[in-house]
Image (cartoon, grey):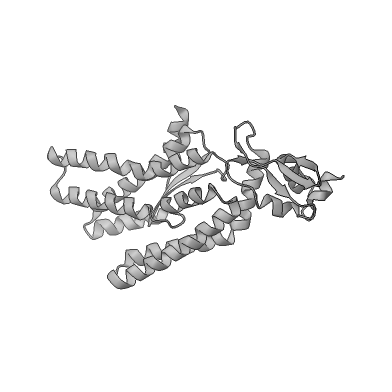
Amino acid sequence: MNKYLRVFQSIYIHPFLWAVIGIGVITAHFYELCLLLLIILVHELGHALAAAHFSWRIKRIALLPFGGVAEMDEHGNRPLKEEAIVTIAGPLQHIWMVALGYIAYEQGAMSEYLFHSFLEFNLMIFCFNLLPIWPLDGGKVLFLFLSLKKSFPAAHKITLLLSLTGTLLFLGAILLFMPTNLNAWIILLFLWFSLFYEWKQRRYIFLRFLLERYYGKTNELRKLMPIEVKEEELLFHVLERFHRGCKHPIVLKKGKVNHSLDENEVLHAYFAEKLVTAKISDLLYR
């Protein structure tokens, strides 16, 4: 039970959000703003509670002036099924929220105006978050889908490129249908900033993935996916072929003889022995 209580203790409200709430009071939109923040909070709690169920490390649940985010201290080495559940747990919260809002409206506990606002906010956040754009939930689902067939860095790179394409389509929609909508422009700038930052950090993110793999849990059953290599291949190029959710025996075929290495030997050589420019042959024949 404590792990679920820690989820609520990790809630963080950005200082600028209080200014936004103040603006809401001045402009007589306080109740609508509170509804929107409540919906965002429940959405993020959905992610966090699902993550807590699988004993993920949760950094914080941040409510920001332009939305919210559940920050996890995980680096791509959890089972893909777990990640999929945690990702979709956020959007699923809108189903019961809409049902509860309808019951409250039917019982007279919510005015027609607030109910329609509540319904509109839920639908907006649900649909927007499912767009295949990083770091939205749809972008994370896209990353998971690509990870089924692609290595971690390849899936990550393709996700970011497809996300950039998605933001350009979003830009087109803004220009055509809502060119004066300030909120849409702020959201677009946030998405561009997130993609730019993620792109700049992609090598660091990949190294964190490898480090977590090297120092993290090793008792989880994972699919075996042998990687066939050549003698002259660099260690890092071999590591770039690592997939999420898979255990990789490293196999070098030389004539009729197969030489094999465990993936931890390669990770140990790269991180502990600092053989960053070494070749696979340096490990096999030493």
Pick whichever, 111 or 229, lies toward us. 229
Pick whichever, 164 or 211, lies toward us. 164
Residue drawn 15% across the image and 42% down it: 105
Can residue 180 be seen in this snapshot? no
Residue drawn 59% across the image and 57% down it: 202
On the rendered image, what quadrant is the N terminus found in?
top left
User: Where residue 111 sits: x, y (%)?
Assistant: 14, 46
Q: Determine the residue located farthest toward the right in the rendered image.
A: 286
User: Where residue 49 sits: x, y (%)?
Assistant: 42, 36
Residue drawn 44% across the image and 58% down it: 133
Q: Determine the residue located farthest toward the top in the rendered image.
A: 1
How many numbered circles does the render carry?
0
Residue drawn 71% across the image and 53% down it: 236
User: Where residue 188 sits: x, y (%)?
Assistant: 40, 64
Residue 281 relative to residue 44: left or right: right
Can residue 116 be seen in this snapshot? yes
Residue 257 relative to residue 95: left or right: right
Pick whichever, 172 or 259, lies toward us. 259
User: Where residue 33 sits: x, y (%)?
Assistant: 27, 53
Residue 252 relative to residue 113: left or right: right
On the rendered image, what quadrant is the C terminus found in?
top right
Pick whichever, 232 or 82, lies toward us. 232
